[in-house]
């Protein structure tokens, strides 16, 4: 039987699909079966990145003047087309990223939801009108576009996260250069093809696949005004440093070490479901993953016993198989990181309550599979309780009270998401106030944010910006305050309307 030919994919620059100038390509392989090559993608160099920036720069002049409701009409069409192709896009995504089909359908759905939500801002994007302190004077504010935005995205949400950034950038009137993760270029390309088909004009969105050289130019070039990055804290720091000399606006969305806190009065079955989904969903490869579970001592042992039994029963496998609940790690490198943390945990004297090994038998042999792993007897100072692992590894810690749980929960470098299981409304509201995170859940796990509220975190998770919701507009636009004086004379604010007080 002859081998199927491997498709060749292109960059998208100035409205044209083209090879990398050097002709170099790199392979995209299925993490569930590394024998399967999904496609060859451009391994681009500086020339390609510069061409993309130039195309975006020149398209900006006209795109910014297209009325926002008209820009939005194109974006509504984007959402419609993705909806029609949801199943195909989800399958492509499972093949290149590994997460199970239900989850890739969710990823595509998140792109649809975000696109509809933010396209609708084309008819809102409200500013303020406010009385002036002076007579016959008008005062208002409006958002203005900023220029070329660099969009640098990770592999764990290969279509959703690009949509979170590209759609608000476009609705605000900016143009885009887009560097998707080298590990998931097909989902990025599917998204960009839809943008093209829906009528986004040439040069308004440009996609270049490749490695760090692209990222470097996209964060340093003088024609870039905004950088929006999701990825590791280490790379985020570099992005920030690269962008600083030109005072680019930088939006960073980085790591997490999220916790689920379980009180002694919690519905334990519900909490268990939440921990399984939050900890092992997406094989733990979410910024929002519940990689710490902090359990009240009164229910701790019972919880651990049941959590372990349920984790052992999870079916690990190829995400395209209907029975699979947990897919592979994205790459051999990521799997090696997971395995190294399992070793670190053991050396720190945490107890492997289940899992702890790579899976290698039979169908697992060609993929990057790892057993769902639970560490018990974890204490807050251990590295497995503090560092982001981004794999199917959950650390269980014991607490003596809600205050103790909050203390442990907050005592990490990150601040993305946290959750509390309790039946006590007073405790729920206390934790809601006390957890210093960007997202908080009551009686639900740490994952599963919806598109219409701000998404992001505190401390080393971010740099104060938020994506999603209308907060996304703040990343991709700048305020302009406007005063119109129709009095026909010079009026001096703060002075003419505050005459010197007469002394008695
Ligand atoms: C991420 O892990 O980077 O809240 C994004 C969630 C998803 C998005 C996760 N809606 O888990």
Image: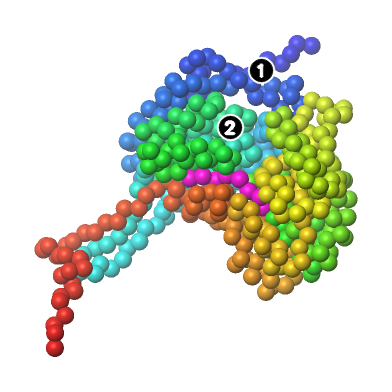
Tag 1 residue: 6
**Dots 2 and 1: beta carbons under 8 Å?**
no
Residue at the spot 30% in from the left edge and 60% down from the top edge = 140
How packed mark 1 is, by other alpha carbons closer than 10 Å (few <14, some 14-19, many 20 or more), is few
Magenta span = 251-258
Q: Secondary structure at mark 2?
A: loop
Asked whether 253 falls inside the magenta stretch, the response is: yes
**Quarter of the rendering occupied by the N terminus:** top right
**Depth check, front residue: 304 or 445:** 304
**Quarter of the rendering occupied by the C terminus:** bottom left
Residue at the spot 55% in from the left edge and 37% down from the top edge = 235
How packed mark 2 is, by other alpha carbons closer than 10 Å (few <14, some 14-19, many 20 or more), is many
Question: Which comes sooner in the sequence, label 2 or label 1?
Answer: 1
Principal secondary structure, stretch drawn in magenta: loop
In front of the other: label 2 or label 1?
2
Give me the disc on residue 181. Answer: 2
């Amino acid at each position: 039987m002859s081998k199927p030919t491997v498709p060749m994919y292109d960059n998208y620059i100035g409205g044209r699909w083209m090879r990398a100038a050097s002709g170099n390509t790199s392979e995209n392989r299925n993490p569930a079966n590394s024998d399967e090559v999904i496609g060859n993608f451009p391994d681009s160099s500086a020339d390609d990145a510069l061409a993309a920036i130039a195309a975006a720069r020149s398209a900006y002049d006209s795109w910014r003047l297209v009325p926002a409701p008209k820009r939005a009409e194109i974006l509504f069409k984007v959402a419609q087309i993705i909806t029609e192709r949801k199943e195909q896009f989800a399958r492509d995504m499972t093949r290149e990223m590994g997460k199970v089909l239900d989850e890739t359908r969710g990823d595509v759905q998140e792109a649809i939801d975000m696109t509809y939500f933010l396209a609708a801002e084309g008819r809102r994007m409200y500013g303020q009108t406010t009385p002036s302190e002076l007579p016959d004077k008008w005062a208002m504010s409006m958002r203005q576009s900023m220029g070329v935005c660099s969009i640098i995205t990770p592999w764990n949400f290969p279509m959703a996260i690009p949509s979170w950034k590209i759609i608000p950038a476009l609705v605000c009137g900016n143009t885009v250069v887009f560097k998707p993760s080298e590990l998931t270029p097909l989902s990025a390309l599917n998204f960009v093809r839809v943008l093209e088909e829906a009528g986004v004009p040439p040069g308004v969105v440009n996609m270049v696949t490749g490695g760090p050289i692209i990222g470097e130019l996209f964060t340093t070039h003088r024609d870039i005004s905004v950088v929006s990055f999701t990825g590791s804290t280490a790379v985020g720091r570099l992005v920030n440093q690269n962008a600083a000399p030109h005072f680019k606006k930088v939006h960073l969305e980085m790591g997490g070490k999220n916790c689920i806190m379980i009180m002694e009065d919690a519905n334990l079955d519900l909490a268990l479901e939440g921990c399984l989904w939050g900890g092992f969903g997406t094989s733990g490869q979410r910024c929002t993953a519940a990689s710490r579970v902090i359990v009240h001592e009164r229910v701790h042992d019972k919880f651990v016993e049941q959590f372990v039994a349920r984790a052992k029963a999870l079916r690990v496998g190829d995400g395209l198989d209907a029975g699979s609940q947990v897919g592979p790690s994205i790459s051999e490198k990521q799997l090696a990181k997971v395995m190294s943390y399992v070793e670190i945990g053991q050396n720190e004297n945490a107890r492997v309550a289940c899992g702890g090994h790579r899976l290698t038998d039979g169908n697992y042999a060609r993929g990057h599979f790892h057993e769902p792993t639970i560490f018990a007897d974890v204490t807050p100072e251990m590295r497995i309780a503090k560092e982001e692992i981004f794999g199917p590894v959950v650390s269980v810690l014991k607490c003596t009270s809600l205050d103790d749980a909050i203390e442990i929960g907050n005592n990490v470098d990150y601040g993305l998401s946290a959750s509390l299981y309790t039946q006590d409304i007073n405790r729920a509201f206390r934790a809601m106030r006390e957890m210093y995170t960007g997202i908080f859940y009551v009686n639900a796990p740490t994952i599963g944010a919806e598109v219409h509220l701000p998404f992001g975190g505190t401390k080393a998770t971010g740099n104060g910006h938020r994506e999603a919701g209308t907060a996304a507009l703040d990343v991709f636009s700048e305020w302009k305050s406007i005063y119109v004086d129709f009095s026909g004379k010079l009026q001096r604010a703060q002075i003419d309307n505050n005459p010197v007080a007469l002394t008695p």
